[in-house]
Every structure is written in C-alpha cells, then in structure tokens.
Image (cartoon, coloured by chain):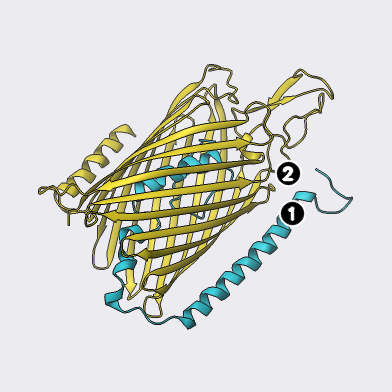
Chain colours: A yellow, B cyan
C-alpha cells in the first residue's frame, strides 16, 4: 500500500507540474486533545475537468496516537499508535447539457480494518440551471478483526442513498436541501471495547464483557444549507442538519461561516462556528448494574451517550502571486473544540485543538 | 428499555416520531424550494459571478473540509449530510 501511495502521489504532482490537472490540492491537519489523543492527517487530490469528462483521485493518511481514558486493550494498556491509509478515485461524464453521471471507488486500510466503497451518482440542472437535482448511492464493505486474535474476522456492509436539490434564489443566494438514508448491517461492535458490569449497589466493578450492539442500524439525515453573498467582499454559509437512527440517537448540528476578502482578494479571512447536540442510544447506560447477568445490548462508547460539542475557528488564505505558480493559494487554520459528555463516568469533557495547512493550485 | 407487552419500545416510538417529523420537515423544505422556483427572477449568465466565487462554495478548501469533517464524524454519532464521505474506517 505504501508503494502504491507513493506512486499515486508522484503521479498527482506530475499532473500538476505538467499542467495536465485542473486542480491539485492538499491539506495537513493535526488534532490534539487533553485525553492524550493525537492525530496527524494528510491528504492530496487532483482533478481533471474536460469538456464532457472529469476525473479525480485522492490519497489520505492518518497517524493516530492514543492513550485515551476509555481505551481498554489487553495488549497495550498504555495506549497505541496506528496508521490508516485511504485512496479513492472517481469519474463523471456529461451525457447531455446539464446531465451528469459518475462512479467512484475508494479503499481504506488499517492494520486490522479494511474498507472498500463503490458509488454511483447522477446530477441534473434544469430551469436555466437554477435548480440542480442530484442522487447518489454507495455500497461499503468492511472487514476487520482484533490485533491479538488473528483468526477473528468480522464484517459489516452499508448501503447509503442520498437525494439533494440546490436552488438559485437570486444572483447572491442559494438554498440547498438534502436527505440521506444509510442501512448498516453486520458486526458493529468495537472488538477492542469492553463494558464494565457491577453488582446492584456495589461500588467496584465485578467483571468486564465485550461490547454488544444491534446488527442493524438505519441512519436518517436531513440537511438544509444557505449560501449568500452578503456584501461585495463578504460571504456567508449557514447549515442545519437533523440526524436520527434506529438505535435511538437523535442529533442536531448547526454551523455558520463568514468569509471576507482583503487587498483585492489576495488575502481571504474566514471565521466559522459549529454546535452539536445528541441524545443517547436507547441501550446506552452509564453504569450496568446487572451482574451476574449481562444485558443483550451493552456499550461503553461515550459517543453513544448524551453529549454536545462546540467548535470555533479562524482560517486565512493567501495568494502569494508567484510567477512560476499562478493560481496558487496557501491557507492556515486553527480551531478550538470542546466535547462535553453528559452521562459518562470516566470523562466529563475533552478539549482539543485542530491546526490545518492547505494548498490549492490550479495550473490550467 | 421500557416496553409494553406486544408494543414498540420507547426508542422505537421516538424514532418513528422523529422520522415522521423528519419526513414532514423534508416535505416542507420541498414545498419551499418549489415555491421559491416560481417566485424568482431568472439569473443571467453575467450575474453568476458571485455564485462561482470560492467563498460562496460549501467547502472552498475541499481537502481541509474533508479532514475536519472526518475528525467530527469519528467523535460524534451523527454521520453524513455534510458531504465528503469516503471509505469507512475503524476509527470508532
């Protein structure tokens, strides 16, 4: 995988250098929190836009170093480090004026988790390109196990469908709506996660058993987004997402972004904020006082409990105006993230920082 | 979880209620979109400059947006609806 990754990376850079690609872009993100989790993620992508055919490719990699308080691993009680690599490609064709169909494939590889995704999509612009309709379908197959148990093989499949519409209300205002349904079947428990059981009224843990969650999960999501030019150099985007699934989780997400250009748009400054609130899954309990019996559905995943998050950040993008690289933009961003767990006995909250660097180059 | 004999569980009822609410809200959004279509003046080609501006896009830096959204989807239960789904991962 590393050899393929390096070959694709060189091919992307070569396409950009030879001006065979319309866009070459990449980003680096560093996540660090006070629960001793650090993630370094990087990605690079290239896109070719022809008259009727367009194609793209992307590579990504994460290096995760974790010693989180809710991580229970017999082999690495002090934490672990792991690398995930991902590659994806897509192609789309314009069949007729305003009608496009496309397909894509992606693969994600970790030491104990391999996931493959195939997708198809359709887009149609009507009413003088004021209304855009889109539909997509994706199938994902994942196979995974446990590092200490080479004979353990678990599988999970998901079918995801999405329909969307985008309407141009005026030269400066666009509204978008989207609905998605994902059906996930197969093993969905984390093989590394154990659940503590207590005797009723006892203070100490009696035993720990593997996590057990339903084999099927239906996820519904609906999103509404407004994009507007508020002023000649000021733009705003607002979005709201409602999520509900068959495990009983209901979540609300709201986000806002404002961007303004300075010095004839040589510098663009953006500020954004995001809030998230979720209910607990129906089978989630902070403490299972059922020993000696174990409930059929049980989890110690704090992300299935009631929680909220808040994120805010700034981003600045600069066009350095280099003669040998026109249409090159370099950006840097910084976010503060606060995660609050309302019913998790081992951690009340996490505070994190996200630092990003991004580059966009349009050689053609 | 609480359940009456032969009845649906509390979280199943809550999901049905939320789904019915979601379908109603989705239908309302569809009506608004169609109504908006009828009430708008056409946008001429020379007026589309703002619509094509980078800052007008949902994700002006797609790679950065993809990485940030992956960070949030791993740390929250809700997934999807905001673009940029890739192949799955064992991050949770």
Horizontal placement of A17 versus B32: left or right?
left
Secondary element under disc 2, as helix, strand or loop, is loop
Asked whether the residues under marks 2 and 1 belong to the same chain, the reply is no
Categorize mark 2 by other alpha carbons within 10 Å: few (<14), some (14-19), many (20+): many
Categorize mark 1 by other alpha carbons within 10 Å: few (<14), some (14-19), many (20+): some
* Foreground of the two, A298 or B48: B48
Residue at label 2?
A282
Residue drawn 64% across the image and 53% down it: A244
Chain for numbered disc 2? A
The answer to whether the residues at label 2 and label 1 have Cβ atoms under 8 Å apart is yes
Q: Which image quadrant: the C terminus of chain A?
A: bottom left
Q: Position of residue A41 (x, y in %)?
A: 38, 36
* Foreground of the two, A328 or A72: A328
Chain for numbered disc 1? B
Q: Position of residue B80 (x, y in %)?
A: 52, 52
Q: Which image quadrant: the N terminus of chain A?
A: top left
Secondary element under disc 1, as helix, strand or loop, is helix
Tag shown at residue B14 = 1
């Amino acid at each position: 995988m590393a050899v393929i990754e390096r070959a694709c990376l060189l091919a992307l850079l070569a396409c950009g250098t030879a001006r065979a690609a319309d866009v070459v872009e990449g980003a680096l993100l560093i996540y660090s929190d006070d629960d001793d989790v650090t993630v370094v993620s990087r990605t690079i992508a290239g896109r070719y836009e022809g008259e009727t055919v367009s194609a793209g490719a992307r590579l990504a990699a994460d290096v995760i170093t974790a010693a989180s308080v809710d991580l229970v691993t017999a082999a690495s009680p002090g934490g672990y480090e792991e690398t995930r690599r991902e590659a994806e490609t897509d192609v789309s064709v314009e069949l007729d004026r305003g009608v496009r169909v496309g397909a894509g494939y992606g693969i994600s590889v970790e030491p104990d988790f391999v996931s493959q995704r195939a997708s198809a999509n359709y887009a149609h612009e009507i009413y003088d390109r004021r209304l855009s309709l889109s539909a997509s379908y994706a199938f994902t197959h994942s196979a995974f196990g446990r590092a200490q148990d080479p004979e353990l093989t678990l599988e999970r499949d998901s079918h995801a469908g999405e329909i969307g519409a985008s309407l141009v209300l005026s030269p400066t205002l666009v509204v978008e709506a989207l609905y998605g349904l994902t059906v996930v079947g197969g093993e969905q428990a984390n093989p590394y996660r154990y659940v503590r059981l207590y005797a009723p009224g006892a203070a100490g843990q009696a035993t720990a058993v593997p996590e057990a969650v339903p084999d099927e999960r239906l996820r519904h999501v609906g999103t509404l987004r407004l994009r507007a030019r508020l002023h000649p150099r000021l733009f705003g985007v607002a979005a709201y997402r409602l999520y509900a699934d068959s495990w009983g989780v209901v979540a609300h997400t709201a986000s806002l972004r404002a961007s303004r250009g300075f010095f004839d748009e040589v510098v663009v400054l953006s500020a954004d904020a995001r809030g998230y609130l979720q209910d607990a899954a129906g089978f989630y309990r902070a403490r299972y006082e059922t020993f000696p019996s174990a409930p059929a559905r049980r989890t110690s995943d704090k992300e299935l409990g009631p929680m909220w998050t808040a994120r805010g950040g700034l981003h600045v993008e600069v066009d350095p105006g280099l003669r040998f690289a026109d249409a090159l933009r370099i950006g840097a961003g910084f976010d503060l993230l606060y995660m609050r767990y309302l019913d998790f006995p081992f951690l009340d909250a996490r505070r994190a920082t996200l630092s990003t660097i991004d580059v966009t180059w349009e050689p053609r | 979880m609480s359940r009456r004999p032969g009845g649906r569980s509390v979280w199943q009822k809550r999901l049905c209620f939320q789904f019915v609410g979601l379908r109603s809200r989705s239908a309302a959004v569809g009506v608004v979109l169609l109504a908006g279509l009828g009430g708008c003046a056409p946008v001429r080609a020379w007026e589309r400059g703002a619509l094509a501006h980078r800052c007008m896009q949902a994700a002006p830096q797609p790679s950065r947006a993809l990485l940030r959204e992956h960070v949030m989807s791993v740390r929250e239960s809700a997934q999807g609806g905001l673009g940029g789904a890739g192949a799955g991962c064992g991050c949770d």
